Amino acid sequence: MTTPFALPAASAGALARLGWTLADGWTLARREFAQLRRQPSELVTMLAVPAMLVLLFGYVFGGSIQVPGDGDYRSYLMPGMFAMVALLGVASSATMIATDIGAGVMDRFRSLPMARSAVPLGRAVADLLTGAAGIAVMAGLGLAVGWRPHGSVAATAAGFALVLLLRFATTWVGITIGLSVPPATAEAMVPVVFPVTMLSNSFVPTDGMPAWLRTVCDWNPVSSLVAACRDLFGNPGGGPHPALPEQHPVAVTLLWAGVLLAVFVPLATARYRASGR
Amino acid sequence: MPPTAAPPPLAIEARGLTKRYGATCALRGVDLAVPAGTVCGLLGPNGAGKTTVVRILATLTRPDAGSATVAGCDVVGRPDQVRYRIGLAGQHAAVDGILTARDNLRMFGRLYHLGARRARDRADRLLARFDLTAAADRPVRTFSGGMRRRLDLAASLILAPAVLFLDEPTTGLDPRGRSEVWTAVRRLVTDGTTVLLTTQYLDEADRLADRIVLVDDGRVLRSGTPAELKAQAGGERLEVVLRDPADLDRAVAAVAAATDAEPVPQPGGGRLGVAVPDGSAALFAAVRALDAARIATADVGVRRPTLDDVFLRFTGDAAERQGAA
């Protein structure tokens, strides 16, 4: 039995292997764009809850919430909504991976001569781009309800870059979860994202909370990201911040992203490698 | 590096494969030898360990002990080389339901590193070969079960693999879907592919496999050609059903004399059965003897053992052993 195609040398050097990893990762990322093109409703579903919260909090509760510095509540709220979209990367990655495992597609990938890290990498890259699309939609919604970035173009770009960075970092958490728990459990975990985003300075300042809860919320990476965005966008609730992790919000957000990536990139890859049950 | 010219005499060779999942022992030392170009049917009840064998040979799972080569490459030491030489289809390897059939095949072609153009050409050829060209641009989730399995099979053949693993390829299919898959598999075999097939369907193993390996409780119980296994399950049986159950004793005597064997009354009344070396000779002799004795029969027939008999007989042994242990 001969193979009609020349095989790429499986024993190629490290650089060639890296090349295959990136190429395989990109092929898998393209698969997800093709899926999104066929089912654009997925993106809408993903954004339904944050969009509803913008309207609910922006117009129903917002009138009675006192914003620090007497700003407009909807402008105060939007950085928190960007952070929520960032954190949804956990949910979308965990469910996507779980779906592939449940359907058997993951087994097919594992039987192919692909780089082992290509599957998580492809998911992370695809998620970064769908996440960017989600944040663009959310920014459009923000503009529609009166939110405006007041900082420089560079500061605004830096704010969105931070949001995307945290999305990219938390996606690896989702990939690890998706590879570690049964598919049904992964899907059941999706709603957990919402309280996690709410346990922060996203909706209300943390000053009014009990001390223990306030500590939890101040150290939530979401709070750092939100504080950083408020500073960079010049939105109400920007610095100076009383809580320690929010005094240098950009640095703390970068640190969080770095820590998450350093822990979960190797963990997700190892889980994928080991998932031969 | 293209694979070397001389094909190995055995396409699959496994020795002492052992695998535990926590407290349960899925495989307790499985040996397997499948000559190139043949179909081996791995037959056994649910939970027998068939799928674990396939998962190990397809490099999805590592064995705890034992070794195996597939198409001449070690599954533990050189999984990448194995993956270039195998295809995996069936219940455990799937296609993407949201994408179209064409997009699925192109994607898998790219993941085999064919390059965009060759992946496209290969996808078109496989779609035509599996009669899916008309449906090529429909999302796979709109496919019937049989179409989906054919696409699944096409996806496992992108590199024209030397060894193809089919894990319960027709489970859950309707009769038409099953026969579609069988036709496709037979065609592959004539092209020289070695196939390892797992199934719980005895007729499927009987129709497709050159050799059957009967697995239960993580062990190989028996192996051989379908005919050999049927012979091991016992030879042909002559069965007689009487019009009048009262004739049973006379009938037993008559059939005993005619066949030179010991007929045994069967449950249900007015029935007897006897194992005979030559079914058709015994049939004529018994009919003549019964006729001479004026015993009226409702039915006389020769029953050849089916793989069902093999299956029940040998897997039953294992269940008893386990119960006794």
Image: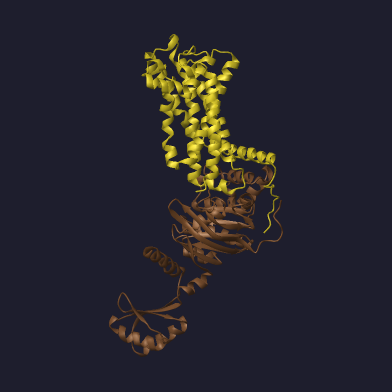
Q: Nearer the viewer, residue A166 or B153?
A: A166
Number of on-image labels = 0
The x and y percentages for residue A228 are 52, 18
Whether residue B190 is visible: yes
Q: Where A80 falls versus B107 (above or below)?
A: above
Residue at x 37% of width, y 90% of height: B292
- Residues B118 and B140: in front is B118
Figure colour of chain A: yellow
- Residue B4 position (above or below residue A227): below
Q: Residue furthest bottom?
A: B292
On screen, residue A48 above or below A204: below
Q: Residue at x 30, y 84 (%)?
A: B247
Q: How is the image coloured?
A: by chain
Residue A70 position in % (x across, y down): 43, 9
The answer to whether B159 appears left or right of B225 in the picture is right
Left or right, A111 with reference to A145: right
Q: Is residue B86 left or right of residue A193?
A: right
- Taking depth in this image into account, of A71 and A158 the one nearest to the observer is A158
Residue depicted at 58% across the width and 16% down the height: A155
Q: Decide which of B241, A2 is in the foreground and name it.
A: A2
Identify the residue at horizontal 42%, vertical 12% (top origin): A67
Q: Position of residue B56 (x, y in %)?
A: 54, 54
* Residue A79 locus on image (x, y percent): 49, 19
Which chain appears brown? B
